Image: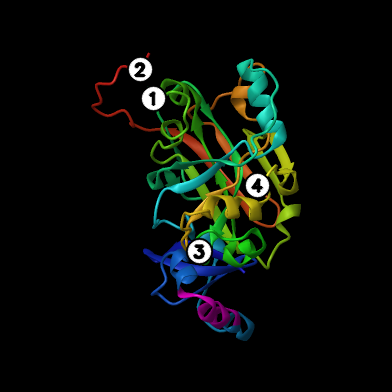
Amino acid sequence: MKFVSIEYRKQERVGVLRGEHVCLLSERYNDVRDVIEAGESVLAGVQRLLEAGNGERAALKDLKLLAPIRRFNRDILCTGWNYLDHFAEGQAKRGEPTKEMPKAPTFFTRGPDTVIGPQDPIAFDARLSEQWDYEAELAVVIGKTGRSIPEHEADNHIFGYCLANDVSQRDLQKRHGGQWLKGKSIDGTMPIGPCIVTKDEIDVADVRLECELNGTLLQSATISQMAFPIKKLIAELSLGMTLRAGDIVLTGTPSGVGFARTPPIFLADGDEVVVKGSGIGELRNRLVRTDLFGKSDIVIE
């Protein structure tokens, strides 16, 4: 199933995407997280509803797609350097000597206020950063709470998958010591969606992840090219740390990001970025000038 959160008749609702229509669930669900937390019995009930062809339906073209999850337990959990070619391109750009991939995944977080919908404008303010970058990613949606999850049980804790664009401000990362939190936590800059595809719907290893900027393809890779597979990420991340139903885990971006190109490619006001995932759909977002700086007295040099 492909779950979506939508705006329908001025209400936030949850539905299941079926071709060019959405089958609406009960009004008590207004975020896909509600369905996830309700558990297997609700999923079974939704399946019966779809098979019977009952329930309210609406044309997809008449609906506004929202970020499928908008209420979070915590920051969005993220993975860095999870494609070998991306790790190598970053080293080369920074002029570092060649070294081996880390023995364990590298994790960081970004704030929930970064999240926007699959067609929403990406907030852009050149006063904050001159180096806005794109990063196409697959996101894993946790479906079952657990801690210290064994790798062979990790699949039991996955609800499904969606797409994310991990828009980053490279110079902010450098300004704050090279760590990633600040340069990836600017409000209104991370689209997710367009739906959450349940894990039984796709063979995730075969998903092709792509990113286009103004119609030009800049990133393309399959999920099977990850250095640390999804089950390994869940086992490592959950070691001594509880993952909760509804948590979102970004799994890293492949090579082709803007800062590593010669010359570099950075995003600007009006640019359209499209992130695609085979069997999942696409995020299509345009950067729009927004006042993010406000009354701040910080001097960025």
| Residue 301: numbered disc | none
Q: Which residue is mark 2?
A: 300
Which numbered marker is on residue 276? Answer: 4
Q: Is residue 48 above or below residue 34?
A: below
Of tags 3 and 1, the one toward the viewer is 3
Residue 72 vertical placement versus 300 (above, below): below
Task: Kindly indicate the quadrant of the structure image that contains residue 181.
Answer: top left
Residue at the spot of label 3: 146
Left or right of residue 216: residue 74: left
Q: Residues within 10 Å of mark 2 (few under 14, many from 20)?
A: few
Using the image as rendered, state which of residue 273 and residue 231 is in the foreground: 231
**What's drawn in magenta, residue-wise?**
38-47
Callout 1: SS: loop
Q: Secondary structure at mark 2?
A: loop
Asked if disc 3 and disc 2 are in contact, CB closer than 8 Å, the reply is: no
Closer to the camera: disc 3 or disc 4?
3
Q: Residues within 10 Å of mark 4 (few under 14, many from 20)?
A: many
Name the kind of residue labelled 3 in the image. Gly
Report the Cα–Cα distance between label 1 and label 2.
7 Å
Q: Earlier in the sequence, mark 1 or mark 4?
A: 1
What separation in Å lies between label 3 and label 1 (alpha carbons)? 38 Å
Separation of marks 1 and 4 at Cα, in angstroms: 28 Å
Closer to the eye: label 1 or 2: 2
Amino acid type at mark 1? Leu
**Image location of residue 24, percent across then percent down:** 50, 73
User: Which of the two residues, 171 or 126, is positioned nearer the viewer here?
Assistant: 171
Q: How many marks?
A: 4
**Badge 2 or badge 4: first in the primary sequence:** 4
Task: Give the Cα distance between marks 3 and 2.
Answer: 42 Å
Identify the residue position indicated by label 1 in the image: 128
Q: Earlier in the sequence, mark 3 or mark 1?
A: 1
